[in-house]
Image (cartoon, helix red, strand yellow):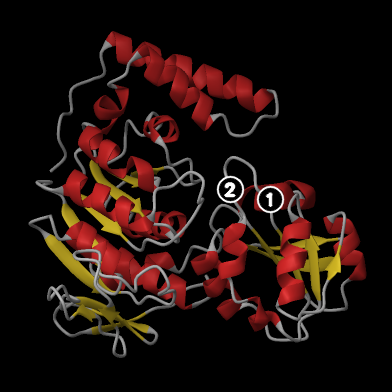
Amino acid sequence: MAGNTEPLSPRAKLAVTAGKAAAAVSRAAGRGSGSVIGGRVALKLDPDLLARLAGHLDVVLVSATNGKTTTTRLIAEALRASGPVVSNALGANMPAGITSALAGGSDAKYGVIEVDEKYLAGVARDVTPKAIALLNLSRDQLDRAAETRMLAEKWREGLAGSKALIVANADDPLIVWAASSSANVVWVAAGQEWKDDAWSCPSCGGVMQRPGDDWFCAECGFRRPTPSWALSGDHVLDPHGSAWPIKLQLPGRANKANATTSAAVAAAFGVPPQVALERMFSVQAVAGRYDVVTFQQRELRLLLAKNPAGWLETFSLIDPPPTPVIMSVNARGADGTDTSWLWDVDYTRLAGHPIFVLGDRKLDLAVRLEVAGLDFQVCESLDEAVQQAPPGRIEVIANYTAFQDLRRRVGN
């Protein structure tokens, strides 16, 4: 059951009103949704507002390096089978953005909240979640985020003693290490395509052994736990061994893994897998990701990839050659200003595709592609790239702020 259902105090109501006003001004000025500035104003007036707003909700937190926005959306759709949901669907995942989202959820039963990795422990303390979904950890925003082992340690310390149900990916050693301090864990075999951040044991530093889909440390005995939920092809296997078909409009294996975790979370709230998965089919795009748009009389599919693991997953779902590919990379504050991660991405997977490069750091990306031995063309704008691209639907892959730039340009 949800916690405190008492009405908000006058101070909290004032903070919510002021926050909504600040957000409205930001939107009117053309500075985005206003969710962050609105939340900051509200929290300034009432530092405990986040906890107050979550008091009547059954809260699910979702955190990961990749896939948290999509998984948050899938869980929200599944839980709507059981009651109204409030969620930060647009991905504003730090305390200010979360506060803005919850301010609109006075009539909701569930709060499904995406949380930035750095803020997970703090937000969990504030909102007392009923469940926390942990998907993966890999290198990202190298100038901002902690090294992955350090981040896993912070999660492990922050979640120790939590009464929340932890729904965690058994295939990622860093996630298992982080979740193992909790008493109530449901393990999900969601897979791990990118393994380059998980070759050393997070427990003792030894070399991880990875035969097939299994993993273990021969030095300290830390090993993959036995999952009770699993992704198997196009089906979710539940703890009873029943197989439920996954039918998504979202592409790729990664989204089937997200759906598997989402089904496990939904089941903890009494929503059966069949119902949860059927509801997930309604999700066609997530904050512009996977949208197919028309621009200059051409079809463009918009794909977000922010780090090596994300690019690897994205390469697995694009149409085969000779489909043209446009790639855009920025290095602004929200991206992380360090682009050395480009050298960890296996761009040779794009061999045979006509490639067009743009963005603030287009020359960084061009050097990387040159070393990879790929043919490409550097462009000054999306318009130029589309004009130069050969016929057919164009796959457009961009990191965070570059993706937002492209969405604005195509009017999405």
Q: How far apart are labels 2 and 1 at the CA level?
A: 7 Å
Q: Is residue 73 above or below residue 194?
A: above
Q: How many labels does the image show?
A: 2
Residue pictured at 81% horizontal, 68% vertical: 356
Q: Residue 330 carries which label?
A: 1
> Which residue is nearer to you in this view: 218 or 309?
218
Tag 1: amino acid: Asn
> Which residue is nearer to you in this view: 198 or 98?
198
Q: Which mark is residue 6?
A: none
Q: In this view, does 344 lie above or below 128?
A: below
Residue pictured at 87% horizontal, 72% vertical: 389
Q: Position of residue 11 (x, y in %)?
A: 31, 10
Is 277 left, or right, of 331 in this rendering?
left
**Figure quadrant of residue 264:** bottom left
Residue pictured at 13% horizontal, 73% vertical: 220
Task: Give the residue number, with chain letter if any, for mark 2.
Answer: 335
Tag 2: amino acid: Asp
